[in-house]
Amino acid sequence: MIHFQDVTKTYPDGTVAVDRLTLEVPTGTLAAFVGPSGCGKTTSMRMINRMIEPTSGTLTVDGRDVSTVDPVKLRLGIGYVIQSAGLMPHQRVIDNVATVPVLRGESRRKARQQAYGVLERVGLDPKLAKRYPAQLSGGQQQRVGVARALAADPPILLMDEPFSAVDPVVRDELQAEIRRLQDELHKTVVFVTHDIDEALKLGDQVAVFGRGGVLQQYDPPARLLSNPANDFVAGFVGADRGYRGLQFFHATGLPLHELRSVGEDGIAALALAAGQWALVTKADGSPYAWIDAEGVALRRSGKSLYDSTIAGGSLFGPDDTLRQALDAALSSPSGLGVAVGADGRVSGGVRAEDVLAALSDQREQRAPRQG
């Protein structure tokens, strides 16, 4: 457990970076620290491994005041992931990952052997082990950074805006990877981000910091969305917090409707009236694109199907939430979101009104019974 008790950080010029912070991060949970620039979230995290020393207050890890622990020993027992990975460019991937075990006294050979297993755990091909960081994509570099932090199997992991420098698609993949790893490893994680969606997606608990380093609210994501503590939190979470809250309701059991669909080889013969859409599927039954009468005409003239609307934004899967289902329905030109099964094949279409009905049902089921 990480415990902040009235922790304050004041710089020599009088700037208060963190103001009387009190909160607990229970063992095995992921706490997301979020807020605008300059709100003290990163400073708070860095006080955990003594990269920054508090001015006053007490910060303990598993009941031990970190100010009494040698900072080098403290940091060797805490994983640390930063933006852009922070890899050593002159070392191969395998040696970057093996860094902390070697510093802790492991032989280089044993540390490298263990590093291969950690690379696979974070979803990297072991063949990349002999490359240098510059030979990897940004997403691969961040995975190596996570692998390096996990290599010595630390009980605590600190992550300082690790995914802010990668593109949205890679970021989404990395977020899913962190959630998977956390479900598997149950580390105690402090994750700093300026992105409220990322905080809500990853955090078991979310701490919202305001200007002057003052903690505004610390709650589970669902409560943060439904019961913001004040106007600052409500404004930071956003006016669409009700939509964001749909991610805490499951999409299983939604009624599925028949979709007009056609294989790629049948597009030329397709008859669509103005305003009608059909879903084009691949040979394996997976969705490919939406096409309308204009798209059919283009295809008959020999133009590529890529002139049509790709179906990717209209998809949701069997393990997704009502948020993904509603987004699929709203983003679909036909008004039907495309539901796919575990095998990736189209299983039907979902309407927005069905999602809202499911939301009402699930809320009623969660409501406390009277009597």
Image (cartoon, rainbow, N blue to C red):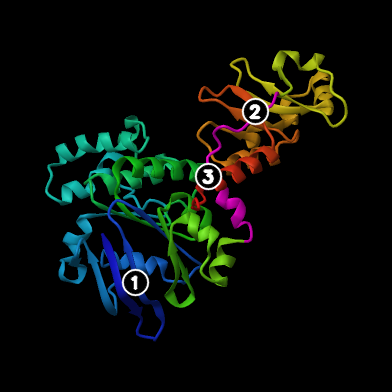
Between the residue at mark 3 and the residue at mark 1, the CA separation in whole angstroms equals 35 Å
Q: Position of residue 49 (x, y in %)?
A: 26, 63
**What residue sits right under mark 1 in the picture?**
22
Question: The residue under label 3 is which amino acid type?
Answer: Gln
Q: Is residue 50 magenta?
A: no
For the N terminus, which image quadrant? bottom left
Q: Quadrant of residue 349?
A: top right
Residue type at tag 1? Thr
Q: Is residue 254 visible?
A: yes
The dominant secondary structure in magenta is loop
Residue 167 appears anywhere in the view: no
The residue singled out by tag 2 in the image is 256
The outermost residue toward the right is 274
Q: Residue at x 52, y 58 (%)?
A: 196
Image-based side of 61 in relation to 121, left or right: left
Between marks 2 and 3, how big is the CA–CA gap? 22 Å
Residue wearing tag 3: 365
| Earlier residue among tags 2 and 1 | 1
Question: From the viewer's perspective, is residue 301 above or below residue 220?
Answer: above
**Along the polypeptide, which appears first: circle 2 or circle 3?**
2
Magenta residues (range): 239-258
Q: Does the segment drawn in magenta span residue 244?
A: yes
Q: Is residue 127 above or below residue 94?
A: above
**CB-based contact (under 8 Å), mark 2 and mark 1:** no
Dot in front, 3 or 1: 3
Is 308 placed left or right of 275 in the picture? left
Element carrying mark 1: strand
Dot 1, how many residues are within 10 Å of its Cα: few (below 14), some (14-19), or many (20+)? some
Q: State the image coordinates of residue 171 (x, y, percent, origin top left).
A: 49, 46
Looking at the picture, how far across and down is residue 276, in whole percent? 82, 28
Label 2's element?
loop
The mark total stands at 3
